[in-house]
Image: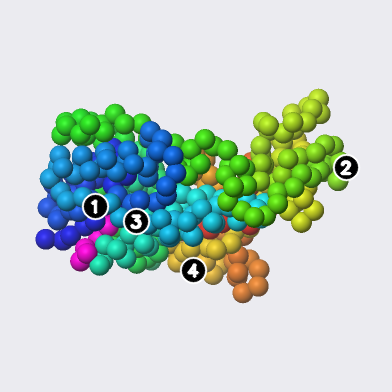
Amino acid sequence: MAKVVVGMSGGVDSSVAAWLLKEQGYDVIGVTMQLWDGEDVEGNCCGLTAAEDARAVAYRIGIPHYVMNFKKVFKEKVIDYFVEEYLNAETPNPCIACNRYVKWEALLHRAMELGADYIATGHYANIVKHPETGRFTLKTADNKDQSYALYNLTQEQLSRTLMPDGAYSKKEIRAIAEKIGLRVADKPDSQDICFVPDGDYSEFIRKNTDVVISEGDFVDSEGNVIGRHKGITNYTIGQRKGLGIALGVPAYVTEIDRENNRVVIGSNEDLFKKRVIVKNYNPVGLGEIKDEVRCCGKLRYNQKKAPCVIRPFGEEGKYIEAIFDEPQRAVTPGQAAVFYDGEYVAGGGVIKGS
């Protein structure tokens, strides 16, 4: 009997994933990852309430449950990364970093120590082999697809991961939870970033760095000073609200100039770009990109796939260059660019610029 460690957040998705795997004949162990000591907010994926809910689910479905401390790796790979990226005038995606380095790398290592064959999560995606290359990849789920947030997983991690929820819709998962009597059947999905529950990213960064975040100039596209900003950590590309300047026309953040501590303001039209440069490319389904490849891309989680061409770029193909058929809005350095070969994740990386 194959043994699997299920990362249980106390939510309905991971709870049903554990039950489905037990029904499929796996030897299932539930593990809740203790990630940080922050405020316990209802719906949060890593607070005390989450651990209590996961423990109750494990008891209900008859599997062992453990709470394991992953605070150190979470601090290094997620929180420190989050702060550093904002200080570098980029907008990070901490959930993707957490998936790659904590929920997979660290948990998989701990699971192997327990003699497990696999780890499992409640994500909505399907792990398969690409029909042409034979590489492990992610196939999009029909409902609530989460493959975008999982593009950074390695071949080893994918080969040792199970995602039973990928075959179901969210409605079906909740129905299963209701049927088997799980009290988390109607529990709301986790929202926002778990370690910044109030959404005040700038204040969190201020408290977690010794770097002085200084005010600077708002400038227009020609470099003319049009106001003062509160510090670059308060802004992201495409932002309109909270700028504190009145120009008589809609104004958006179009660029953050870290070197000169300036925030560039422009029109909505200024936000659209066809070209995107991607760093830290992770080859998933298609492997290394050596020539021009026709595919589709997403530059944010909720965006629809858009047709594009990707190809190596820079010295020795250090980067990937994506040219979209139609201009894409708010190309944001630090966010993920994920590319799809039909239903399969071809690969992805971090947006460097446009």
- 119 left or right of 179 in image: right
Q: Nearer the viewer, mark 3 or mark 2?
A: 3
> Mark 2 is on which residue type?
Asn
Q: Which residue is mark 3?
A: 69
Q: CA distance from mark 4 to mark 2?
A: 43 Å
Query: x and y percent of residue 3 in the render?
Result: 18, 60
Element type where label 2 sits in the image: loop
- 73 left or right of 254 in image: left
> Mark 3 is on which residue type?
Asn
Q: Which residue is mark 2?
A: 224
In the image, residue 148 lies in the stretch drawn in magenta:
no
176 or 9, which lies in front? 9
Label 1 environment density (alpha carbons within 10 Å; few <14, some 14–19, many ≥20): some
Residue at the extreme top = 248
Residue bounds of the magenta highlight: 114-120
Q: Nearer the viewer, mark 2 or mark 1?
A: 1
> Mark 1 is on which residue type?
Tyr
**Mark number displayed over residue 66:** 1
69 or 331, which lies in front? 69
**Mark number displayed over residue 271:** none
Q: CA distance from mark 1 to mark 4?
A: 39 Å
Element type where label 4 sits in the image: loop
Q: Earlier in the sequence, mark 3 or mark 2?
A: 3
